Image: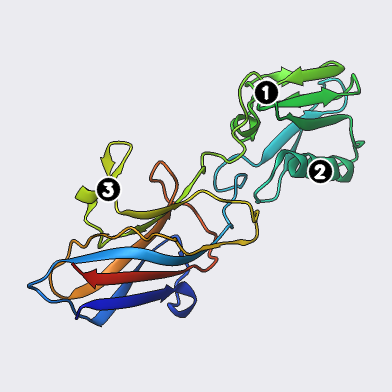
Amino acid sequence: MDSILLNINTNDLNISNTSNFTIQFDALQLDHNNDYHVALVSYNVPYSWYNISSAQGNNQFRYSRDGGISFTNLTVPDGNYGVEDLNSELQTLIVADGGLANKVFFFADYNSLRVDLQITDVNYQVDFTNSNNFRTILGFASQVYSGVGIVRAPNRANITNDIDSVSINVSIVDTASVLLNNRQSSSLFHITDYSSGPGSYLTGRPSHPIYLPVNVAGNIHNINVSIRNQSDRIIDLNGEHINISLHIKKF
């Protein structure tokens, strides 16, 4: 066989972990005597990962509204938040807890790539000393913030929580042909355009597909597909389905 177009749709595979799965094949036959290469020709990957979640241990917000005499822990629902989205959610949670909106709030300073915390009531404080909060996403230090005024986070915001690109990895890629930060990798393609926003799909067709050597001679019995970040860590897609098309051809 000279060429195969392989379409993989997790919706048809009856799997729950769409971030890292293996598909079995009965009749994916390649000629033992020839070399083959594979390229990604289309992808449809959900922008469904979270930057704040209970699984990541960063979904707690601890604050006081009585001058630090007592503190309350609020749980932020799992999700992918921008600074404005997170601030809006916190105001809702504080009001539901019996507090007042806009006594503490966060806003982004895009010029400095930092986040500001403004406290407008001397009785309100924010405690970032507990271990399961989201301070590192916003760039704040592990301390209690108090006093009326605006405080700028000492560190740059990491609102993506270290997911700056999405890599589609396929196990039949010869890892000797791909280097990721000086490490061998099975990555076929990196998605860097997130303009569609959380809750949408990242969809595309590479205009110039890059063909990489296949590491299997003869029949292919299974292929593992994984979705990873730029540091080669698995991205949790929260069970949302992906669809990719691979082109395998003889070289």
Whether residue 185 sits left or right of residue 19 in the image: it is left
Whether residue 108 sits left or right of residue 100 in the image: it is left
**187 is higher (above) or lower (below) than 3:** above
Q: Position of residue 180 (x, y in %)?
A: 32, 42
Residue type highlighted by circle 2: Ser
Q: Provide the residue designation for mark 3.
A: 178
- Disc 1 from disc 3: Cα separation: 35 Å
> Of callouts 1 and 3, which one flags the residue occurring earlier in the amino acid sequence?
1
Label 2 SS: helix
Residue 181 shows up from this direction: yes
Q: Nearer the viewer, residue 180 or 22?
A: 180
In the picture, which quadrant includes the N terminus? bottom left
Q: Position of residue 217 (x, y in %)?
A: 13, 68
Residue 125 shows up from this direction: no
Q: Provide the residue designation for mark 2.
A: 88
Number of the front mark, 2 or 3:
3
> Of callouts 2 and 1, which one flags the residue occurring earlier in the amino acid sequence?
2
**91 is higher (above) or lower (below) than 177:** above
